[in-house]
Image (cartoon, helix red, strand yellow):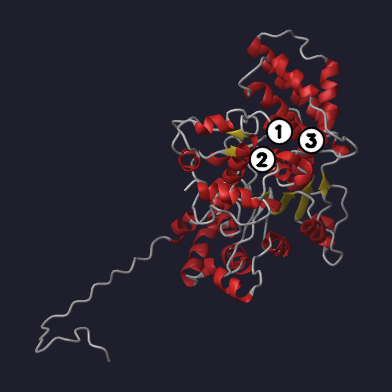
Amino acid sequence: MTSFFPDARDVSVNEFKVINVSPSVGDPLNDLASRIATGALHDSDERCDAPMCHPETRVAVQEEIYSWIVHSDPLADPAQKTVKMKWVTGPAGTGKSAIMGSVADTCKQNGVPAVTFFFASYASPDRRRKTAFIPTLAYQLTEHLPALKNSVAQAMRDKPLLFKKNLRVQMEALILTPLRQVAVESNVPGVVLIDGLDECEAEQFFDSHVASRTGKSMEREKGEDQLEILQVLREAALDPAFPFRIVIASRPERVFREFFNNENHKSSFAPSLVLDEKYNPNADIILFLQAKFSEIRRRYNLSPSWPSQEILAILLDQASGQFIYAATVVRYITTARHGNPQTLLDCVLKVKPASPGTNPFSHLDAFYTHILQSPPDRILAVKWLWIIQGVLPETSYNIFVYMESKPAAFLLNLLLQTDTGNAEYVLGDLHSLIDVPPSDDLETPYRPYHKSLYDFLGSEDRCGPIYVGNMQCIEFLWGSY
């Protein structure tokens, strides 16, 4: 046995007191609250400027989703009436997040319990990964169903390593088992709304030193974590004790198509809602443009006939069913540093894609290219945009992975700018693409308005001469130190 005092001689200890300095066990629910992704809640401060459906737009889609949540599908066969899981899908820029946010608000206004998680690749780290997913759902469930609190707290006491377990174990311990132990009665079903699941990044657990020795890549693909989330949600939906319906919104990427179209369990899902021409997005886009141009007319005292119906028709055609194009046009006209509304609108109308063809993104790509040619140094601006995003091109690794939240714009400016005011020089003409906090704001991060910008920047075929690769970004970042 090793002595506490190996070199001591003739030592006599008359009194020996042991003081336990281990932390005391606190309230498990407080611990749970500390582990949630607060920014992922639909009404969080982080989402204060999140897109919402403009009044009188996307009404049919919202009503279909809300009706299914509350009443199921009245035309469905009896077996389908018990199905609790639905997929809402559409390509980039079709308004999925705005629709889900508006549905969440409608649920709140009508007293329908809504548990939400809004993933976002450009947001705080815990909104980009699965780590906080189950704790966030469980915490919201205890808020809506207080009878669950004791069972959830006991599960955390019994399993101190619970949050190191996989999602299935967490779902069982924090949600399904407590629900089975407590009789939940509700005349109006609640809902779990999951938005942007396709933006969930992969949690990485590998040792880079091991990978370098073996020469094998051990990096997880984001589809693995997305599939794990889909699987545990399906298990919850199939459990008789789970009282809520589940609505998942994502782009139609492969992992989602294969999961929801799998013949082995397709019957456990409600019919998917595809945001296509059936829901007449053009009518909603026109309403949006008319409302926004009306605001611009009032601000600048313009003619009531501005812009003409012919101009609106051109913008509608160029939108190709994508709300993001219309929203970017409006932001460009209202935030540009140079030019009056008519001059800026003329600039928009002059932007033509190099090869329109049948690509629905051709006008959006051309417009992004036009905006990104405005800064004095467009390549430098693109490098800044990639560093702000955190996930560099051609890789899934996030440079902010070990930070609790996205760094404030103020801190990134200190890192990247070579001279005071350099940030305004680089980003001053990009306010239609990214929310730039005031220079005296020490807390707010940069917020890109839409993921489609990085889809564009990440494709050399789409962005052409302004494409910036991974190594260029790394060299730029390294040179900033």
Upstream in sequence: badge 1 or badge 3: 1
Question: Local crowd at mark 2 within 10 Å, few (<14), some, or many (≥20)?
Answer: many
Q: Secondary structure at mark 1?
A: loop
| CA distance separating discs 1 and 2 | 8 Å
Q: Amino acid at mark 3?
A: Gln
Residue 48's spot in the image, x, y percent? 57, 36
* Viewer-proximal residue among 71 and 276: 276
* Viewer-proximal residue among 107 and 463: 463
The answer to which image quadrant residue 278 occupies is top right
**Residue displayed at 66% across by 12% down:** 298
Q: Secondary structure at mark 2?
A: helix
Q: Amino acid at mark 2?
A: Gly
Question: Local crowd at mark 1 within 10 Å, few (<14), some, or many (≥20)?
Answer: many
| Residue under pointer 1 | 53
* Viewer-proximal residue among 252 and 6: 6
The answer to which image quadrant residue 167 occupies is bottom right
**Residue 206 in sight here:** yes
Would you place residue 53 above or below residue 88 in this image? above
| Residue under pointer 2 | 101
Upstream in sequence: badge 3 or badge 2: 2
Residue 424's spot in the image, x, y percent? 53, 30
**Residue displayed at 84% across by 16% down:** 309
**Residue displayed at 59% across by 75% down:** 213
Q: Are marks 1 and 2 in contact (CB under 8 Å)?
A: yes
Q: Amino acid at mark 1?
A: Cys
| CA distance separating discs 3 and 2 | 17 Å
Hey, which residue is sitting farthest right in the picture? Answer: 357
Closer to the observer: label 3 or label 2?
3
**Residue 118 in sight here:** no
Q: Secondary structure at mark 3?
A: loop
Picture disc at residue 322: 3
Q: Are marks 1 and 3 in contact (CB under 8 Å)?
A: no
